[in-house]
Image (spheres, rainbow, N blue to C red):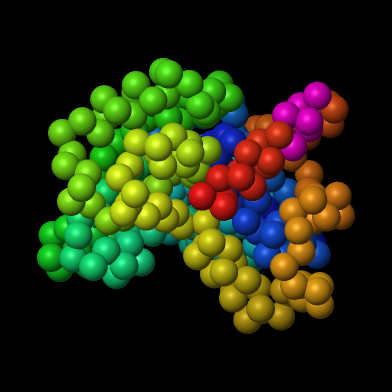
Amino acid sequence: MNIGIFDSGIGGLTLLHQAMVLMPREKFLFYADTDHVPYGTKTRDQVISCVNEVIRFMAEHDCKAVVIACNTATAVAAEQMRSRYASFPIIGIEPAVKPAVAESGGKRVLVVATPLTVHERKLQKLVERVDDEHLVDLLELPGLVEFAERGEFVSDSVTTYLQGRLMGYELDNYRELVLGCTHFNYFKDTFRALMPPQIHMIDGSLGTVRQLMRVLDARQELLEPPAETGMEWQQIKNDICVRYFESGREITDAARLGNIAQLHERLERMRKI
Ligand code: DGL
C-alpha cells in the first residue's frame, strides 16, 4: 500500500524528501494541488474543498496513511478530514513552535507562515499553550510561495522581499526561526545569510515523519527500514518508488520528472543547513 503525501504545490516535497530518507522501503504518492496553489491566501471554505478532493483521491489510490504536508491545510482542514475519512490515519504538519520555544533559552522566537496559517485559531491556540513568557512573534510571508512555485529560490528579488518583511524585527533578540510553511525550506540558504548566526531554523517535517512512523508502527503497517542505517540520498533516490501527481494528473513527462529531481537535490542541500 501507499503513503499519500500532499501539498498545494512543491512545498510538500520537503516532507516527502524527509520521509524518503527515513522510510526508504515504502511506496509514496505525492500530490501537488497545482491547479489551486496557493492555499495560504484563500478562504477556509475554499481550502477545505480542495483538501477534500485530494484526500478522496488518496482514498481511491490504496493509501494506508495520508500526510497533509501543508501547514495551512492542516490548520484549516485536518480535523474535519479525520472525521470524514476514518479508515486510514491522516497526519498533518504544524509549525514547530513547541520545540522552538523549548530551545530558545528565553530569547525570542519568530514563526513565519502563510496568512491563513497565521490567522487560524489552531496556531493561535498552540502559541497560547506553549508560549508562557510571550516570546513568540508571527509573521506572514505569502510572497515566498509564489517565488517557490516559479522556481526562483535565490535571487535579488527574494533577498529584497525577505529584507523588507524582516525590517522592524530586532533579530539579535531572536534565537529560533520556525519555518511554518513547507515552501519556505527552499529558502534556507537566503534565510541563513540574512539571519544573525545565533538564530537556529526549525520546521515541522522531521517531527511529522516521525509521527507518521509511530502511527504506522502502532497499526503494524510500517515497513522496517533496511538494516543498513544512514543510507545516502544518492542511493535512496534510485531505489525508492514514488509516483507524482499534479491535481490528479500523473506526471510522466521526463522533463517534469527531471525538474522534480532537481528540487529534491536542492532540498537535500537545504536539509543540511
Ligand atoms: N506549503 C503550504 C504550507 O505549508 C502552503 C502554501 C500555500 O499554498 O499558500 O502552508
Rendered residue at 20%/30% (across/down): 167
Up the image or down, 272 lies above or below 42; here it is below
Left or right of 167 in this view: 218: right
What residue occupies the far front of the structure in this picture? Answer: 197
Is residue 191 shown in magenta? no
Rendered residue at 50%/65% (across/down): 207
Quarter holding residue 151: top right
Main SS of residues in magenta:
helix
Of the 4 image quadrants, the one containing the N terminus is bottom right
Rendered residue at 59%/29% (across/down): 34
Rendered residue at 57%/34% (across/down): 9
Is residue 258 shown in magenta? yes
Q: In the rendered image, is residue 205 in sight?
A: yes
Q: Position of residue 264 (x, y in %)?
A: 68, 42
Up the image or down, 54 lies above or below 212; here it is above
The span shown in magenta is 255-261
